[in-house]
Amino acid sequence: MVEGRLIPKPAVIEDVVDEAPNVRTFYLRMPEGYPEPKPGQFNELYVMGVGEVPISVSDVTQEGLVAHTVRVAGRVTEVLAEASVGDVIGVRGPYGKGWPVEQAVGKDVLIVAGGIGLAPLRPVIRHIERNRAKYGKLTILYGARAPRHLLYKYELEKYASIPNTELLLSVDKAEGPWEGHVGFVTDLIPKADIDPERTIAMICGPEIMMKFTIKRLYEIGLKDNQIYLSLERRMRCGVGLCGHCQMGPYFVCKHGPVFPHWFIKKYFWVEQI
Amino acid sequence: MVSGGIYSGKFGELRKLFNALRLRGYRVIAPKLEDGVIRLKEVTSFDEVPYGWEDIQAPGKYSVREGGKHFRHGPDAPKRILYPPRLELFRLRPDWSVEYPKERFPPTALFAIKPCDLASISVMDRVQGGIGDPYYLALRKKLIIIVENCVEPGATCFCSTMGTGPEARDGFDIAYTRLDDNLVVFRPGSDLGVELLSELNIEPATDEVLRKYYDALKNASLKAKAPFELERLPDELELGLNSPVFKEVAERCFGCAGCNMVCPTCFCFDVIDEPELDGGAVRVRVWDGCFSYTYAEVAGGNFRKDLWARYRHWVLHKFAYWVRQFGVFGCVGCGRCITWCPAGIDLRETIKSVVEWVRSRGGG
Amino acid sequence: MMRRKLKVAVFKFASCSGCQLQILNMEDELLTLTDAVEFTYFLEASRATAPGPYDVAFIEGSISTPEQEELVRRVREESRILVAMGACATAGGIQALRNWLRLDDVKRAVYPNPEWVKALEHSKPVAEVVKVDYELRGCPVSKERLLSFIKQVLVGRKPYLRREALCMDCRRKGNVCVMVAKGIPCLGPVVQEGCGAICPTFGRGCYGCFGPSIDARPEALASRLREVGMKDRDVARLFKGFTGWSEKFRKVINELEGGAR
Ligand SMILES: Cc1cc2nc3c(=O)[nH]c(=O)nc-3n(C[C@H](O)[C@H](O)[C@H](O)COP(=O)(O)OP(=O)(O)OC[C@H]3O[C@@H](n4cnc5c(N)ncnc54)[C@H](O)[C@@H]3O)c2cc1C
Ligand code: SF4
Ligand code: SF4
Ligand code: SF4
Ligand code: SF4
Ligand code: FES
């Protein structure tokens, strides 16, 4: 019996970048035949004998390395985070439905990210940067616990210099010199210059943050069909077999993780659905 | 729908049918009385099938007695054979090469299973089959099904409501019905079924037998009913997501996931990665269930930390979400989760109460 | 991923040695481990010192005397990972039955010169004295779990062993539920899996030696047992068996007995 879908294939770690306390990005040389991931898709990363975790693709480099930004959260991520250049880990993927980068052509794009939630949205920023003429204004609202917890600090400023782009940052606590906002990332929504008529919003962060964000977006006039979010659920298989990731009738791993808000709204707001 | 005609014969023809399966090299899995319970096990002799025994089922209670006319299904569902509780998927060697366990998939006959269990296989065909579970498909391809229609459904059965019994509609090779001690009605449901039946000493059913047959099954279908209707049930249950009923029932529930385990259609599994001393690893698939606490647990939280939410998910998945996911109900009305719930919780009552709650609020 | 040899120590406190025996019974499995693990046994923990440091210390037995309290603190300091092993170490064990009685009464009943017996008021689980990193439950612990635990430590991962209700494992295994089919009271629905459902496999109810499962609801099981006709006293006795002193069971027992402890 050959259950091919659950077999991790070896990938070599070519580069490791320290991003923030307990967060590192791993650039992987993917195995032969691995398809190019779309922004918002994820892979299952496996450490031999330790276990497997779903991790979003946070970049695809010019050389074809696939980046994963991993925050230490438990058993597997803890060991994974210790891996170094030259180590081999297992991968399966890419899985899931990604961000609506095609539907957003010709529109303004608003990105709202909290904490590690910027990782799956970074490929969207890259995509817009590379196809700048196809999109309208890009607004990036990003919040983290404290300045040192911001991801991709070395390139955040560069985002601001992408033509027609606004970048606003927020931290819960400043801890030292800090020019951005202190408070919730949702506080940035009224501060940003957003045209509700022509904006597609893409949100990723803790569920509670996404819920607040949606409420704020309603206030400035966005409609459900302009809002997309990436959901998190427990995942064991990543391919619609094991049942764990269900949210209402949807398997987040294969029907998502990115969903248009109107589509899941009926379930998403139900307590402990 | 049923192909072929309706035949009748003596009880002894069942024995012949059984032996014919064995002769053709099938591993026969059938009801078998073991330690006071009717199990589903490999049997080598027709005499092991507990004809002449009857089970008595009620919420949280099970027993058998000799002298009864009809047995129902026990705790084991075909799922146990087709989708085993624990399955080693593969081993990874330290160099990442893959080693598969050597499995054998003998041609298998399910003999005298009940219509609800047959229906559970057609649900699995959509779920495990639909997602292409290789183990399932390998066994399924070589599976032959002889189903026994239910003339006397048990007290926890509600196949009639679920549309899965007490008469098997399709998906079997042969369906038979024991009308009395020495009168059995046979229907073929596949080419193989026709072939097997043609070797028996049976005859086209007479009008009298037919009448008896229809009456018996009609009577049975009046018994196996739940206090709710299927029509619009998924929508009504979704309107009942906030019903207090789930919290009330969950007060009595242990969260033991026994119901998930005995349910013939529950498919959830956990993935266990075990390290090997040589630096490789094994990956094992084990049945999991949505009643378990860790089922929806993630690093830093739990999407269904309260038992009532897990209880609600179970009910909603079976009777609402499943329809959206796979186009059929996830419940075949076998009543196992009722009989085999150590808390004696009756799923039918829960659904009835939720529907009443929804209707009392003008929904539905 | 294999590193230097893992230094493992096994300490015995107030217990029957059943858990250690379980380790000794694992000869075949242990042989496969000898390249990777070095075992040291302290059969009489009260006299041994604790010359560490250890990667993993398994503590067998409950803490019943002031000396033991002192010693287990020292072991803690010497050990990277401290594991409470068995029902005694994780929940006080059978000897915790005395916790419901007055210590002096127990002493008087058991010993001719009770004043010579130095004992703590309660037979305590290890976690009441020092920080415990992991629990390996059971009376005795399960070989499979122990082995899996060691292998997981060897690959540098935080060991993970499922902690759901025993019923899941019992039914996966294909047992017939004794509560339903035989009317035998069983603690399985609220007890942690791991034993392989030994008792139900032999047609008996679970006595609870693995202690409460994650998110156990013993109060619901207690009401069900009363509903099917068991007396409060008998329900309490059932819960008391092996792991009655665990927080969750203790609460139910006290409610059933109407006591205020
Ligand atoms: C679609 C998706 C994309 C993700 N992308 C990223 C990312 O880019 N970077 C990042 O740091 N984290 C990401 N996460 C979260 C990450 O998967 C969890 O932090 C991780 O699984 C925790 O595993 P653990 O073994 O370290 O923790 P434990 O708590 O020990 O988890 C044990 C197991 O439970 C499951 N599990 C636990 N938490 C989660 C969770 N939050 N989501 C899904 N399964 C879980 C996993 O199967 C895991 O192996 C993502 C999650 C999802 C669902
Ligand atoms: S409904 Fe019954 S079988 Fe299911 S989890 Fe609750 S107590 Fe266990
Ligand atoms: S939900 Fe209950 S009645 Fe329905 S199929 Fe599953 S076990 Fe049978
Ligand atoms: S009811 Fe629960 S265990 Fe069964 S299939 Fe649905 S989610 Fe899985
Ligand atoms: S015998 Fe005990 S452990 Fe097994 S299913 Fe029944 S209640 Fe659960
Ligand atoms: S993660 Fe297994 S079904 Fe989605």
Image (cartoon, grey):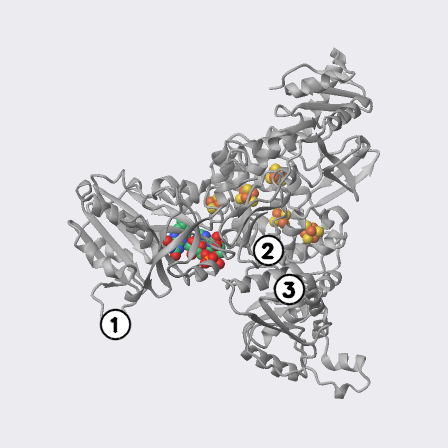
Residue indicated by mark 3: C137
Do tag 2 and tag 1 residues touch (Cβ < 8 Å)? no
Of all chains, the one bearing label 3 is: C
At label 3, which amino acid type do we have? Arg
Of callouts 3 and 2, the N-terminal one = 3
Residue indicated by mark 1: A176
Q: Is mark 1 within 8 Å of ligand 1?
A: no
Residue sitting at x 60%, y 30%: B141
Query: For the residue carrying disc 1, how many other residues have a C-alpha within 10 Å: few (<14), some (14-19), or many (20+)?
Result: few
At label 2, which amino acid type do we have? Glu
> Residue B327: x and y, percent?
50, 31
Label 3, label 2: how many angstroms apart (C-alpha)? 13 Å
Which mark is nearer the camera, 1 or 3? 3
> Residue C167: x and y, percent?
65, 52
> Residue C30: x and y, percent?
65, 64
| Of C54 and A209, the residue lying toward us | C54
State whether residue A244 is above or below residue B319: below
Q: Is residue A246 visible?
A: no
Side (left or right) of B82 relative to B48? left
| Of B23 and B296, the residue lying toward us | B23
Residue indicated by mark 2: C164
Q: Is residue A80 visible?
A: yes
